[in-house]
Image (tube, rainbow, N blue to C red):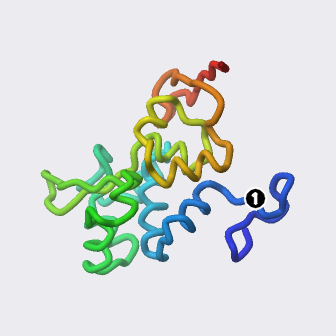
Amino acid sequence: VRDDGAVAGAGPSSSWRPVFARAVAAYGLAEDEIAVLLFVVTVKIQRSQAFRSLLLTPDQMVIEGGCSGTHVQYVLGLNQLQMTQLADDSHPLVRDRTLVVREDEMFGGVKMCVPDGVCFALLGKSLVAEDRLRLSGTLLLTIVDGTGCGTGRSETRDGDVLSGGKSAARTTVHE
């Protein structure tokens, strides 16, 4: 990966850039915001219990509903001001529903998560109709459509794609 985010030698053009890199540039994210988004996506898509245990503290072994804001702050070395700015409803990631921030009723503070459709989009996977609907009107969907990912076909999911150890099968039905 070059300094400009392009992947050298990938695809027919040497300036090809992954959806995640395009989204970071389009949203104008700072380094701390990139780190939070990357961390939350990584926690969501990982499948290894060993990796999960490395990411979470002993009292937070279950990742139901997202990552604790306190834990994200601790792991990434962020200050409270950075977390407050990122969790604000006016932040572009939160406003676009790319990053969902809600109150953590169990531990206090906030929980941060990314919806499944956002993970698929950021990873360059095809989007099912439901995901496209949830992302309608967002900058992320504009970016995905610009890359050609998920356009021109209707899809349905077959099984729980992001669950640990289960099949990641997706069935595509071409129009």
The residue lying toward the viewer, choosing from 85 and 148, is 148
Percent x, y of residue 95: 34, 57
**Percent coordinates x, y for residue 52 in the rendering:** 42, 51
Q: Quadrant of the C terminus?
A: top right
Q: Which residue is painted at 44% across and 42% down in the image?
A: 136
Name the amino acid, label 1.
Trp
The residue lying at 55 percent from left, 60 percent from top is 23
Q: Element under label 1?
A: loop
Write down the quadrant of residue 15 in the picture.
bottom right
Which residue shows up at 30% across the image and 50% down it?
61
Residue at (27, 54) in percent of width and height: 60
Depth check: 62 or 37 in front? 37
Residue 81 position within the rendered picture, expressed as x and y whole percent measured from the top left: 27, 80
> Quick check: 100 left or right of 106?
right
When asked about the image quadrant of residue 14, the answer is bottom right
Taking the view exactly as shown, the residue that stands out farthest to the front is 137
15 horizontally vs 82: left or right: right
* Image quarter in which the N terminus is found: bottom right
Estimate the x, y position of residue 111 in percent, counting from the top left.
26, 56
Which one is in front, 86 or 168?
A: 86
Q: How many marks?
A: 1
Which residue corresponds to mark 1? 16
